Image (cartoon, helix red, strand yellow):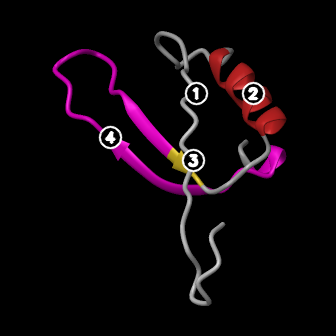
Amino acid sequence: MLAKYKISIASVIQKESDKSHVPLVIMTHEAYEAGMLDAVREMNNFSFVNGTVRLIRVEDDYIDGEGNER
């Protein structure tokens, strides 16, 4: 469903849990905020999601191979 919003997964972390649900942390590649908000809205409506999906923006400044900061 993320592809529909042009969101690509960079990594997924599944935390151990002794509860009936398992928390997931999904890191994505750079994506448009509007698409992220739409995806979060859709995920919150899934019957198998326990709790509320949260979005935390992570900004990544780096210097490319030519010394240019991005």
Which quarter of the figure is the C terminus placed in? bottom right
First in sequence: mark 2 vs mark 1? 2
The label on residue 59 is 3
Say which residue label 2 marks. Answer: 37
Taking the spot 77% from the left edge, 36% from the top edge, the residue there is 33
Tell me the distance, in whole angstroms, between the alpha carbons under discs 4 and 1.
16 Å
- Percent coordinates x, y for residue 37 in the rendering: 75, 27
First in sequence: mark 4 vs mark 1? 4
Mark 2 is on which residue type? Leu
The residue carrying pointer 1 sits among few (fewer than 14), some (14 to 19) or many (20 or more) residues within 10 Å by Cα, namely few
Mark 3 touching mark 2, by CB under 8 A?
no
Q: Residue furthest bottom?
A: 66
Say which residue label 1 marks. Answer: 55
Q: Secondary structure at mark 2?
A: helix
Q: Foreground mark, 3 or 1?
A: 3
Q: Residue furthest top?
A: 51
Tell me the distance, in whole angstroms, between the alpha carbons under discs 4 and 2.
22 Å
First in sequence: mark 4 vs mark 2? 4
Q: Nearer the viewer, residue 44 or 32?
A: 32
Say which residue label 4 marks. Answer: 14
Q: Nearer the viewer, residue 57 or 67?
A: 67
Q: Secondary structure at mark 1?
A: loop
The stretch of residues the image draws in magenta is 3-26
Q: Is residue 16 magenta?
A: yes
Taking the spot 53% from the left edge, 19% from the top edge, the residue there is 48
Which quarter of the figure is the N terminus placed in? top right
Taking the spot 62% from the left edge, 70% from the top edge, the residue there is 69
- Percent coordinates x, y for residue 27 in the rendering: 50, 47
Mark 1 is on which residue type? Leu
